[in-house]
Amino acid sequence: MDIADKLARTHLLTKTEAMELLEHAEDRELAKRLAQDAVELRKKYYGDKVFTRGLIEFTNYCKNDCYYCGIRRGNLHAKRYRLTRDEILECCENGYELGFRTFVLQGGEDPFYTDERMEELVREIKGKYPDCALTLSIGERSREAYGRFRKAGADRYLLRHETADEEHYRKLHPKEMSLAVRKQCLNDLKELGYQVGAGFMVGSPGQTLECLAEDLVFLQELRPEMVGIGPFVPHHESRFAGEPAGSVELTLFLLSVIRILLPKVLLPATTALGTMDPMGREKGLEAGANVVMPNLSPVKNRKQYDLYDNKISTGEESAEGLERLKKSVALAGYRLVCERGDFIGQ
Ligand code: SAH
């Protein structure tokens, strides 16, 4: 296909081209070809390495009300938890012993964790583990707060844009949230020198191929160091309870396209992909992904970080499952490594 050729050659897509490519997403031959190109690029830049990030889901309190999310404030049935500073440090310690050299602190937008408390936490973790990369994923904060966290030692920040289409953004979020603010946060984070991760859900309610084309254009403009995508999975206590989940195949197709658009990007095979398909993670790697994020949270709280139904938490995506994960990654032809795995430049 002409567009696939052009994509492989130039690593660029216009919105119209992205639309046309996506219209053929069910063409198995095309998907295969894109996956081959993607895997080749990933090998060229990262060899056979698959990077690990230790995920610490440290609070499920959230002041936001994103309609798709199981831990949004409007879900009165969610059992809330918040790890203490000591518990978080313990997660890091366990992770460090297991070999992890990057930690991701992810949570709802929890007012208890004020800018001051977060700054202190970052300083403490980086003081104890100066050799580790620290990633934050705690939603929207002021530029000033992002600057303080950065100064305290935070290296990376994950903030999915969720959808780059204004109208679609409105369908997924209450009116006090806006795509403009989300984009502003991402720009601030970039300017402050974070390695930034954007991303979106595949198949979220109301998403059209045009929305996805918009997402691809947005990623090309932002040029994030990381991109997290995974299928939308309905949560039973949400207005989208009856909506179908996003497609694994389309997610894999998009992983390949993103790898070709941004050849050096760090691209996780996400938990949502592993939730929707028992071989989802491996399939993600075959499509061009090169990161996995095992869960380092205390086992007693895992079920409570309930973003969507049936979220997997104790299998190979968990820290305890690391040995099994190593084996399955090796079987897929790759090598799981625990090093920091920094972005290697645009
Ligand atoms: N509060 C943080 C972290 C959010 S949870 C923030 O705003 O960035 C991390 C990601 O989980 C979200 O960005 C969203 O893309 C994803 N997620 C939430 N609900 C989901 C669902 N129902 N299905 C699939 N992914 C979901």
Image (spheres, grey):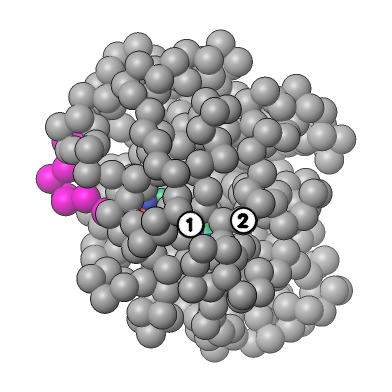
Res. 309 mark = 2
Q: Is residue 222 visible?
A: no
Label 2 near label 1: C-beta < 8 Å? yes
Q: Nearer the viewer, residue 201 or 215?
A: 201
For image coordinates 56% across by 84% down, the residue present is: 208
For image coordinates 24% across by 66% down, the residue present is: 181
Q: Which residue is mark 1?
A: 70
Q: Position of residue 88 (x, y in %)?
A: 39, 23
Which element type, helix, strand or loop, lies under badge 2?
loop
Locate residue 204 relative to residue 148 in the image: left or right: right
Q: Position of residue 119 (x, y in %)?
A: 21, 30
Task: Look at the numbered disc 1 and say if its residue's Cβ is closer than 8 Å to ligand 1.
Answer: yes
Q: Is residue 296 above or below residue 187?
A: above
Task: Look at the numbered disc 2 and say if its residue's Cβ is closer than 8 Å to ligand 1.
Answer: yes
* Residue 157 magenta-highlighted: no
Q: Position of residue 262 (x, y in %)?
A: 54, 58
Q: Is residue 109 above or below residue 9?
A: above
Q: Nearer the viewer, residue 276 or 16?
A: 276
Give the prevailing secondary structure in the magenta stretch: helix
Counting residues from the N terminus, which is met first, the one under dot 1 or under dot 2? 1
For image coordinates 68% across by 86% down, the residue present is: 23
In the image, what residue type sits under mark 1? Gly
Q: Position of residue 303 (x, y in %)?
A: 57, 40
**Over which residues does the magenta segment extend?**
139-151
Locate residue 140 relative to residue 13 in the image: left or right: left
In the image, what residue type sits under mark 2? Asp
Query: Where is residue 145, by image quadrant?
Result: top left
Which element type, helix, strand or loop, lies under badge 1?
loop
